[in-house]
Image (cartoon, rainbow, N blue to C red):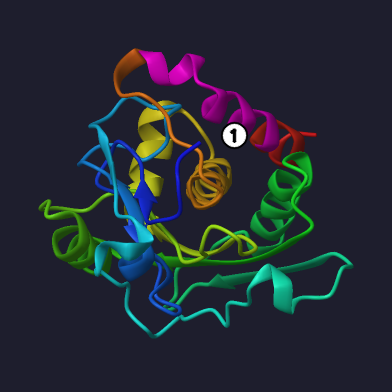
Amino acid sequence: MGGPGPQGTDTPAHLPADRRDLRHEAGAQAAQPGRLDPARPGPPQAAIPKDSGRHPPSAHRLSGHAASDREEHAVITIHVNAPGNGRVPRALIDRALREALRQEGVRRAELSVTFVDDEEISRLHARYLGSAGPTDVISFALHGEDEDPFGDVYVGRAQALRQAAEAGATPDEELVRLAVHGALHVLGYDHPDGPERRSSEMYRVQEAVVRRVVSP
């Protein structure tokens, strides 16, 4: 697992979220054009650490609280944002992220997942990861070393739908997969490039969550 910062997939789909510049300026990971999910073939990923000086847009900022400032009981806050008319399975995504956090033993966290169009994900991709074109997901870890997980995830909705069609997956399954993928990056997970991705711990955790939530 890596440190805090934006993360993305192997397609041009990993871009930081826009909360408190969760992704874009704290740390972000994104994939090159192709796929963001390690489950699917695509370009290599890149990460932007929290202290990189590159911050995500402030439109979707999270409130962010250090672990020491939170109460001892479990506090999980999930924000699912979908500007525009594109449909997203909000309930499934909320459930999947909570399942991923539960599986990792995380009891206090705040995550934001924002679904954007090709134009916006391409803009974030270029600005924060220096790559042209749309990508599927970009993540920003905004928490410090001793803080509860706190981050933003940006998912390119159109890119996700294209990937779903290519892979024979349902749109909901792919949207959930990318949201979980981005969240795992926020938690510090990473994976190798190429075919080895499928044998990574991150891939195993991701697919276990997708199977449990999308096709129980």
Question: Where on the picture, by quarter, is residue 118?
Answer: bottom left
State whether residue 210 is above or below residue 101.
Answer: above
- Where disc 1 sits, the SS reads helix
In the rendering, at what x and y percent does residue 211 appear? 69, 31
- From the viewer's perspective, is residue 68 above or below residue 38? below
Q: Is residue 191 above or below residue 77?
A: above
Q: Is residue 32 left or right of residue 5?
A: left
> 89 or 182: which is nearer to us?
182
Residue at x 50%, y 38% (from the top left corner): 189
Label 1 belongs to which residue?
206
Residue segment shown in magenta: 196-209
Q: Position of residue 117 (x, y in %)?
A: 31, 66
Amino acid at pointer 1:
Gln
Dominant secondary structure of the residues highlighted in magenta in the image: helix
Instruction: Give the left or right position of residue 9, taking residue 151 as reference.
Output: left
Is 142 placed left or right of 212 in the picture? left
Q: Residue at x 51, y 44 (%)?
A: 188
Q: Residues within 10 Å of mark 1 (few under 14, many from 20)?
A: many
Is 202 covered by the magenta stretch? yes
Image x and y of residue 108, in percent: 75, 63
Image point (51%, 53%), residue name:
186
| Picture quadrant where residue 184 is located | top right
Q: Is residue 198 left or right of residue 194?
A: right
79 relative to 28, above or below? below
Q: Nearer the viewer, residue 182 or 92?
A: 182
Residue at (54, 39) in percent of width and height: 170
Q: Can residue 14 be seen in the rendering of this structure?
A: no
Q: Looking at the image, how many numbered discs can be counted on the residues? A: 1
Q: Is residue 156 magenta?
A: no
| Coordinates of residue 48 in the picture (x, y in percent) | 29, 54
Residue 26 showing in the rendered view = yes
